[in-house]
Image (cartoon, grey):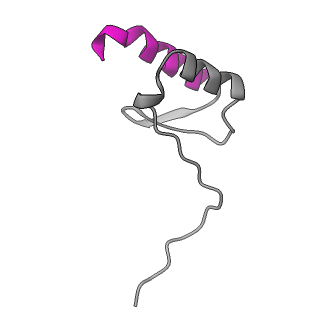
Amino acid sequence: PERERHKREWLRYQLRDLGFKMIQKSVWIGKKKLPSKFMEDIRDLKLLPYVEIFSVIKAGSVPTVE
């Protein structure tokens, strides 16, 4: 929500500080595991309903479909 703009700014700053890069508006990518303190802060700020986090364990190519 717009009334919580300061939280979005905080989140962007934290992600940049952790070495993440924005690849699309509101989409960030990084090679580090998110620290538990960061996750605690996300919970404390009540941002979990607005944040989706996923990880890719193995990089590779997409298999072809025959």
Q: Is residue 54 above or below residue 40?
A: below
Residue 37 in the image, given as x and y percentages of width and height: 69, 22
Residue 15 colored magenta?
A: yes
At 29% across and 13% down in the image, what residue appears? 2
Residue 24 in the image, given as x and y percentages of width and height: 38, 37
> From this viewpoint, which residue is outermost toward the bottom?
66
Q: In this view, does 63 lie above or below 24?
A: below
Question: Total number of numbered labels?
Answer: 0
Q: In this view, does 7 lie above or below 55?
A: above
Segment colored magenta: 1-17
Residue 28 in the image, given as x and y percentages of width and height: 49, 36
Q: Tell me the quadrant of the picture where the C terminus can be found.
A: bottom left
32 or 4, which lies in front? 4
Q: In this view, does 25 lie to the left or right of 64?
A: left
Q: Tell me the quadrant of the picture where the N terminus can be found.
A: top left
At 37% across and 11% down in the image, what residue appears? 4
27 or 49, which lies in front? 49
Please tell me in which quadrant of the rendered image residue 26 appears.
Answer: top left
At 60% across and 18% down in the image, what residue appears? 41
Q: Is residue 24 left or right of residue 31?
A: left
Residue 2 colored magenta?
A: yes
Query: Taken as a whole, is the magenta stretch helix, strand or loop?
Result: helix
Residue 45 in the image, given as x and y percentages of width and height: 51, 15
At 36% across and 32% down in the image, what residue appears? 25
